Amino acid sequence: MFERYSRQMLFAPIGSTGQEKLKKSKVLIVGMGALGTAAANHLVRSGVGFLRFVDRDYVELSNLQRQMLFDEDDVRESLPKAVAAERKLRKINSSISIEGIVADVTAANIEEFLVGIDLIVDGTDNFSTRFLLNDAAFKNNIPYVYGGVVSSRGMSALFIPEKTPCLRCFITEGDGSGETCDTVGVISPIVDIVSSYEVTEALKYLAEDHHKLRNGLISIDVWQNRTHVIPFGEAKQNCPTCQRKEYPALKIDHEEIATSLCGRETVQIKAKQSFLLNEWSNRLKPIADVKETPFLLRVQLKEGERLVLFPDGRVLVQGTEDIVRAKTLYARYIGL
């Protein structure tokens, strides 16, 4: 172990004792896009003993500009991000346990992914999932490292149940600017910087150097040369998560069957049953251009849109943000 982690162990705040603590740690990353892949790369190289990550998407060409674990072969194979990331990370460090899961994280399954986990790292690109992670973290008494980037801007904070306020104390649902990487773009340096802030706080926490934790939310704009830290104060009065302990994002009956993925020109629809990909490939080939992989089915429709079927029963309707239009295509080719 010393040779692999020697430079990190020479860093006094970690040392051999901290390295042993990292080895015993278990971390969950939700979302293996830009932030998730960068954070996973750091955590795996740092020697965190167990890393689980969950992502619902697959690798596309536009990802390669900022999602560091993927390459053109992954695009050609239409690999799910969790599968491609697991393959790369196992080559980086074979001495730790790595588990990539292709799934959509929802109120119905989030707590399954948290079993045995010491820390949650945010690799998501939307606030609905972040509020879900926040609520699940505080319900299960697990620290949550928040991170978000868009354009040249980013934010990060470590929220610790019973010790700090939570994400809802800083951001109210619906308060977002509406800007996404697909509408205003993003440059890769801000991804690296914010993921590094996320992982640094994670390492401090896992190595138990808690008195060095930032204890605040950092906001940075690398293009405009601005950095600002908002210190943690008191929790927001009557916060439904950390004060009233209601955890609204975990209410399963509030989940949407059809969800527009902001800025992606994509609507996700959840089927009530799983898909046998080879069966659906045979069914759709006579009427559409179908590409089958072991992980998903891509169906180019004559209407111009594209369906992507996953074994767990999810369908991405790509080429529209109109939920009604997506449901119409879904009903036409899949059935409701």
Image (spheres, helix red, strand yellow):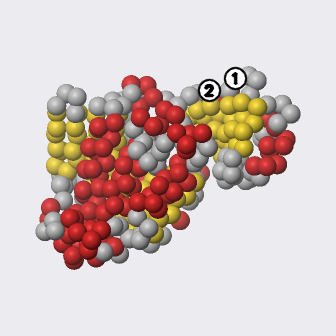
Give the answer, above or below, for where 170 lies relative to 117.
Answer: above
Q: Residues within 10 Å of mark 1 (few under 14, many from 20)?
A: few
Residue placed most toward the observer, 317 or 232: 317
Give how far across and how far down residue 175 sits, in percent. Answer: 36, 35
Identify the mark at residue 319; answer none if there is no mark. Answer: 2
Residue visible at 69% across and 23% down in the picture: 304
Residue 322 as seen in the image, left or right of residue 167: right
Residue visible at 55% across and 44% down in the picture: 74
Give how far across and how far down residue 41 sits, in percent. Answer: 37, 54
Mark 1, secondary structure of its residue: loop
Q: Quadrant of the C terminus?
A: top right
Mark 2, secondary structure of its residue: loop
Type of amino acid at the residue the image marks with label 2: Gly
Give how far across and how far down residue 258 sits, in percent. Answer: 63, 39
Residue placed most toward the observer, 321 or 108: 321
**Total marks drawn?**
2
Give how far across and how far down residue 29 sits, in percent. Answer: 42, 56
Q: Quadrant of the N terminus?
A: bottom left
Residue visible at 25% across and 57% down in the picture: 201
Residue placed most toward the observer, 306 or 257: 306
- Residue at mark 1: 304
Separation (CA) of disc 1 from disc 2? 7 Å
The answer to whether marks 1 and 2 mark residues whose Cβ atoms lie closer than 8 Å is yes
Residue visible at 27% across and 50% down in the picture: 196
Residue placed most toward the observer, 12 or 36: 12
Identify the mark at residue 170; answer none if there is no mark. Answer: none
Q: Is residue 105 among the parts visible in the rendering? A: no
When asked about the image quadrant of residue 185, the answer is top left
**First of labels 1, 2 by sequence position:** 1
Q: Residues within 10 Å of mark 2 (few under 14, many from 20)?
A: some
Type of amino acid at the residue the image marks with label 1: Gly
Give the answer, above or below, for where 148 lies relative to 223.
Answer: below
